[in-house]
Amino acid sequence: MQRIRLRYTKRGRLRFTSHRDFQRAFERALRRAEVPMAYSAGFTPHPKVSYANAAPTGTGSEAEYLEIALTEQRDPQKLRELLDESLPDGLDITDAVEARTSGLADRLTASVWELRLEGVAAEDAERAVAAFLAAGTVEVQRKTKNGMRTFDARAAVADLRAAPAPGDRPGQGPCAILRLVVRHVTPAVRPDDVLSGLRAVADLAPPVPAAVTRLAQGLFDEESGTVTDPLAPDREAVTAAPPKAAGLAAAPEPTGAGPA
């Protein structure tokens, strides 16, 4: 059995697809691409696909990950191309690597998010960010299946910065960009929770819903404050692995003299 790890995106209008919608689209793509999938046992076998920490519905993402199990060996890059062609535009397979290490989910400990706040001046966003970071705790509420839950949105935030939108962007009026690095904790702190916290500490309320995109996801490096590529250990393992034998070993040189 071969395991392949894939990185994929949710762009444009397809950010509104739910995780279940993506699962259905991906399984159809597996059939179209004729991928030799391994299946689970039991009365209702299903393809062995492991999804890791999917982004919430309504948010875009450049860094979603999953792993598939195959019954035959395939070249990861050719497989990536076939699957990418079989998915709709916006759900794009951008990277593929053979799994040579364990614990992909354990390496997804933080995310980098971009929040686009239309109608908010950069100066107002900077003041709100400063108030949020200065607070010891920022309690917010979120409705769950068990009712309203109150939790601290500040503790999970490793970094939060504000900047003006690029000058060549389409549209008129002010626009602020927030860059957010948030650790994956329990309960999960989402970008909309941080926006609720900014409203609570600084009365920052964008006139339109924020456009949210996950830019990266991986292991959080406490020393540098960056989020590393979770597929890098697999690439390094592939590079370090000895090449497979191309055929039989060469015959030893004869020790005696040949015929005259």
Image: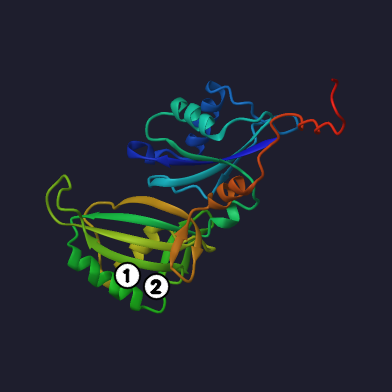
User: Residue 232: where, in percent of width, then height?
Assistant: 53, 51
Outermost residue on the front side: it is 260
The quarter of the image holding the N terminus is top right
Q: Relative to residue 159, is residue 39 drawn left or right?
A: right
- Residue at (20% x, 67% y) in the render: 124
Circle 1 packing at 10 Å, graded few (<14), some (14-19), many (20+), is some
The quarter of the image holding the C terminus is top right
- In the rendered structure, find residue 138 and report the number of the disc placed on it: 2
> Compared with residue 63, is residue 182 higher up or lower down, i.e. above or below?
below
Q: Relative to residue 7, is residue 119 drawn left or right?
A: left
- Residue at (54% x, 30% y) in the render: 79
Q: Give the CA separation, mark 2 to mark 1.
A: 8 Å
Query: Mark 2: which amino acid?
Result: Val
The quarter of the picture where residue 136 lies is bottom left
Circle 2 packing at 10 Å, graded few (<14), some (14-19), many (20+), is many
Say which element carries label 2.
loop
Count of numbered tags:
2
User: Residue 127: where, in percent of width, then height?
Assistant: 23, 72
User: Residue 25: where, in percent of width, then height?
Assistant: 49, 30
Between 128 and 7, the residue placed more toward the observer is 7
Q: Relative to residue 99, is residue 12 drawn left or right?
A: left
Outermost residue on the right side: it is 256
Q: Relative to residue 183, is residue 243 drawn left or right?
A: right
Q: Are marks 2 and 1 in contact (CB under 8 Å)?
A: yes
Between 106 and 119, the residue placed more toward the observer is 106
Query: Mark 1: which amino acid?
Result: Ala
Q: How is the image coloured?
A: rainbow
> Compared with residue 206, is residue 211 higher up or lower down, i.e. above or below?
above
User: Residue 52: where, in percent of width, then height?
Assistant: 55, 48
Say which element carries label 1.
helix
Residue under circle 1?
200
